[in-house]
Amino acid sequence: MTSGTEATVAVLGTGTMGTPIARRLIEAEFSVRVWNRTHARAQPLAADGASVRNSPSEAADGAGVVLTMLSDGKAIEQAMLGPGGALEAMHPDAIWLQMSTIGPRWTDRFVTIAHGHNVELVDAPVSGSDGPARAGELIVLASGSDRTRERVQPILDALGKRTLWLGAAGAGSRLKLVINNWLVCLVEAAAETLALADGLELDQQLFVDAIAGGPLATPYALAKSQAMIEEDYAPGFPLRHALKDVGLTLSAASDADVDLPLTAALEPRWRRVADGGHADDDVGVVRAAASSRAGGDHGTAAA
């Protein structure tokens, strides 16, 4: 990117995804400002070269791009429009790069709000968790006007291994829900299949070994199944985030008059696991819900 404001990116939200995103941008020699509602979570980025700011407006003032990576639509609305919000400080040529998973309703609302402030919004959620974010291997699902594409592409190149440009702003958020619906259905299928193997008194590893390298396997399903077998639930994609996305998906499906019986059925089962103290564990912990019927060791977690 060019010098001055074009090379300055304000990252609002330094959680699981925002922190590695900010570090990737610093490594790519952008001037990076960061803000987080809990100031202490942003402070470690100062050692990497980021300028830690006290409010969204302070971070956004003079920045060419304001990148939001926050938990949900309400958090983004507060950061952009609340007291000390970023939009009040953004100049008319600045770009709002919205990368959180918030669904079509919030995205469409923010496109309208951005237009009212003479700011263009690029809707660019990502496929991938914190590991790919650290490695710069995210898949970026970008949507926005052609005139913003050239300006934000260097940022997206620093963050991902591939960017899909999908059309007008909003298409990225819609495709993200489609992808995440596939993901959660894969997780539930893996959990139930392993529970079945266990119930039939088979070594669960036999299932993974049988499908590995064949047409029934995907790298994600294999990795998630292996983690379930090993009961490794270190959070790559926390269950609470997965449940948020399931809610967004079911809401969008309802608006589109589409029935998703599999997704609708897994939601209450997963919520019981989350409410049982596993909300911050990896989504693979839903193996607990399947195990409760199979008499597995995790039955109490799904109670």
Image: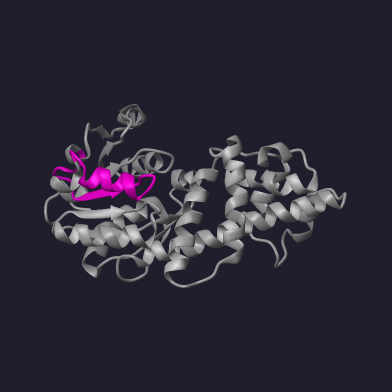
Is residue 72 covered in magenta?
A: yes
Query: What percent of the width, then of the height, locates residue 181?
Result: 53, 61
Question: Vertically, is 117 above or below 226?
Answer: below
> Closest to the observer: 71 or 302?
302
Tell me where residue 42 appears, x and y as whole percent: 33, 32
User: Is residue 206 shown left or right of residue 232?
Assistant: right
The x, y position of residue 112, in whole percent, is: 22, 62
User: Residue at position x 88%, y 49% from top?
Assistant: 201
- Residue placed at 58% from the left, 56% from the top? 184
Q: Is residue 273 magenta?
A: no
**Eyeballing the image, is 175 above or below 193?**
below
Give the residues in magenta.
59-84
Locate the C terminus by quadrant. Answer: top right
87 displayed left or right of 199: left
Q: Which colour scheme appears in the figure?
A: one colour
Q: Can residue 219 be seen from the camera position used here?
A: no
**Quadrant position of residue 38:** top left
Q: On the rendered structure, is 187 left or right of 29?
A: right
* Residue positioned most to the right: 201
Q: Residue at x 43, y 71 (%)?
A: 256
Residue at image coords 32%, 47%: 74
Number of marks in the image? Answer: 0
Q: Is residue 36 visible?
A: yes
